[in-house]
Image (tube, rainbow, N blue to C red):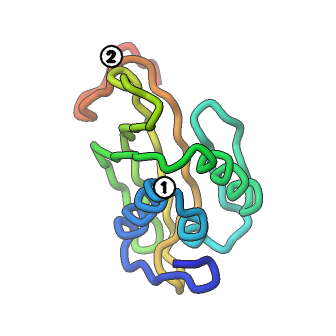
Amino acid sequence: MSSDKKQFLATAEDTEHAFYDAIARADLESLMALWADDEEIVCVHPGAPRLHGHAAIRESWEMIFERGPVHIHPRNLHITQNMMSAVHSVIEEIKLAEETNFEDAHIIATNVYLKTPQGWRIVMHHASVAAGKASDGHHADSSILH
């Protein structure tokens, strides 16, 4: 899929699958074709500042892909959806070629999708490193205050 001819994606889940597939292949063109055309799109990588708009988001993924593909396995998906938007909360398990032990590291990500005439598109990806071991996503930590 090139950014010139965007593939129609019928569900937010299809878009999410294509997003992680493009990252696993380090396919910048396919990845960027998944974002909404609106310049109000936002991306936050773990430990990094908020990026706003296509140019900044594209540049960040170019830098990430310089090291090659990133294999991310999203799990513990929690979906909130209506007819026009969807919010997916996932835990990302990440495998990098140079990393050998990722047992205690995990990323909490929120992906927001919007239904457009061209199908479902990403409007926000926000990923943060979470402290401690990955939760199964089914219980709340009583030490969290909000």
The residue drawn where x is 42% and y is 56% is 20
Q: Residues within 10 Å of mark 2 (few under 14, many from 20)?
A: few
The amino acid on which the numbered mark 2 sits, given as a three-letter code, is Ser
Q: Position of residue 1 (x, y in %)?
A: 51, 78
Q: Position of residue 109 (x, y in %)?
A: 46, 42
Badge 1 marks a residue whose secondary structure is helix
Q: Residue at x 58, y 72 (%)?
A: 33
Q: In this rendering, is residue 52 above or below 48?
A: below
Question: In the drawing, does residue 3 fall left or right of residue 98?
Answer: right
Q: Position of residue 14 (x, y in %)?
A: 36, 70
Q: Which mark is residue 142?
A: 2
Q: Position of residue 84 (x, y in %)?
A: 46, 73
29 relative position to 53: left or right: left
Left or right of 126: which side holds 63? right
Q: CA distance from mark 2 to mark 1?
A: 34 Å
The amino acid type, in three-letter code, at marker 1 is Ile
87 or 134: nearer the eye? 134
**Residue linked to disc 1:** 23
Crowding at dot 1, Cα within 10 Å, few <14 / some 14-19 / many 20+, comes out as: many
